[in-house]
Image (cartoon, helix red, strand yellow):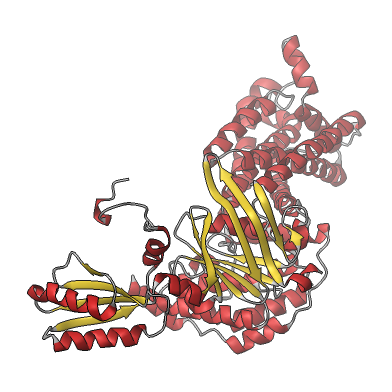
Amino acid sequence: MSTQTTGLAIETAGLVKTFGETRAVDGVDLAVPAGTVYGVLGPNGAGKTTTVKMLATLLRPDGGEAHVFGHDVVREADAVRGRVSLTGQYASVDEDLTGTENLVLLARLLGHRKPAARERAAQLLEAFGLTDAAGKQVKNYSGGMRRRIDIAASILNTPDLLFLDEPTTGLDPRSRNQVWDIVRAVVAQGTTVLLTTQYLDEADQLASRIAVIDQGRVIAEGTKGELKASVGAGTVHLRLRDPAQRPEAARILRLALDAEVQSEPDPVALTARVGGAGNGQGAAEQAGRALAELARGGITVDNFSLGQPSLDEVFLALTGHDTHEADGDQDEVAA
Amino acid sequence: MSTVTQTEDKELAPVSTASLAALLIAKERPPRPSAWSASMTFGWRAILKIKHVPEQLFDVTAFPIMLVLMYTYLFGGALAGSPTAYIQFLLPGILVMSVVMITMYTGVSVNTDIEKGVFDRFRTLPIWRPSTMVGYLLGDALRYTIASVVMLTVGVILGFRPDGGVGGVVAGIALLVAFSFAFSWIWTMFGLLLRSEKSVMGVSMMVIFPLTFLSNVFVDPKTMPGWLQAFVNNSPITHLATAVRGLMAGDWPAADVAWSLGWTCLFVLVFGPVTMRLYNRK
């Protein structure tokens, strides 16, 4: 009922989960509008999976409240379970069974009669391009096929809310794109998706709102545009032909981009953040102008690229520390 | 590594988002399955697993055959004059002992299975919560039945002739399987409670060996010291062995059948809820 009035698929307030001494989730507030893809972005161990597990009724929160479509995840767990499904690195399918057997088993558990369960399983396998592998045990599936059967198992009944916990971690770019296509198709039918990811571009591709989580807390929340504006639209990477020209190149770049320029350990490489001044637009334009300036200054550029800020850079911008929490060179990380 | 992935992916048909969309439009949800139906579906899962990994039937076939042969010929001459004479007494008892011993594999498989992701999926389904475990044990009941049939066949070949006929034998096996189903809840509890497969195995041995050996399976307890008799005469295994022996011999050992069924109910009522509590917490 309250779904209609609030329009929220998920609402949490001060959600806490502790494991011994560690506060894995330390007061998370989320408000996920129904019918959208909501991205939860953060490094390994930030508390993303723990949050999802609490929302999917797999873990009991130690503090705070969480409602899914207005139902309390602890007191009305059964009502929540009727409307959500979960796909992740952990919620998967039975490896010893075949693709068909897995889907028929789950369809039966969702209340379909045998013929209907078989039909639904066959249709989903067909739509997911798995008909040829239907009779094979899932343990013989490739990574991309595994992810497909996992998602197929999650949409046997079209869920109102789908949790996708790092759905593309460990996939090659091609399979990753296919998973993205599937997610778009699911959302187009009105399902709300909560997507956790370590990849900024994944959240960028799919999500309309993003929460950035670090050490169990939400450290930034907003639309994609807002988030980007706070961290800059991207990073320019340059490789020069002549290392002797680097100081001069850095000076020109600093002026053209109005941004800080970093000298990389590689003697011919430079990086600079662009579009950090509040407007995410025109990053390419700005970078183009900088290139022209460099050419006018007589500097030979061998290689040039403009990339989105990485998660590391988002973190650096938002928290002042990077995702590994280690200061200094990565090669020297001891602990 | 990348070449392998690529060839695999080339063979993989593309995802048809159009037909996917058509499938997702169907919003109607069937009513939730009954507790019975969900449990039977999980039982079906257990049977599918046996189908795909038939090696796991080793412990319900080779192991019991070994036990029957070993004890018949090891003790037969000394205890009853001849193996054939001894097997009339031994077989129902060794049947009880082996099947009860086999139940401990339940704990090990629950322990390894529960770590797999698929259990998280089961736990997010809107179904009767214990059905996962009940289904598991229904699959195991099938394994116990297989073990019983295998041992009886070997016994009959070695000269076991039950006076109770087919009816008595079937009644005996039914009682044994029901008891073992209930007894298995102890192992599901340990499977969920203990952290590793090895510790589950260790604890199971500590419970199973004294419990099955300190009974009337091999010999009449009359020759045992008083304190041991007190234990043996009240052990659930003794009651069960006496009941199965009686049923197969064509008698109606009402008291022992009642005791066995009483223990059966007690195990389910105590260890069932404890298992479910642990399962919900996991």
Q: Is residue A131 above or below residue A332?
A: below
- Give the position of the N terminus of chain B as an image quadrant: bottom left
Q: Nearer the viewer, residue A77 or B70?
A: A77
* Residue B221 showing in the rendered view: no
Q: Residue at x 81, y 45 (%)?
A: B174
Q: Position of residue A35 (x, y in %)?
A: 66, 77
Q: Nearer the viewer, residue A103 or B215?
A: A103
Q: Is residue A212 above or below residue B248?
A: below
Count of numbered marks:
0
Q: Nearer the viewer, residue B281 or B83?
A: B281
Q: Position of residue A161 (x, y in %)?
A: 67, 70
Q: Position of residue B242 (x, y in %)?
A: 81, 29
Image quadrant in which you'd find residue B200: top right
Q: Is residue A237 above or below residue A221?
A: below
Q: Residue at x 13, y 84 (%)?
A: A300
Image quadrant in which you'd find residue B26: bottom right
Q: Residue at x 64, y 51 (%)?
A: A59
Residue A220 as seen in the image, left or right of residue A263: right
Q: Nearer the viewer, residue A245 or B191?
A: A245
* Residue B149 showing in the rendered view: yes
Q: Position of residue A111 (x, y in %)?
A: 78, 68
Residue A325 as seen in the image, left or right of residue A64: left
Residue A42 as seen in the image, left or right of residue B89: left
Q: Is residue B198 above or below residue B255?
A: below
Residue extending farthest top: B226
Image quadrant in which you'd find residue A287: bottom left
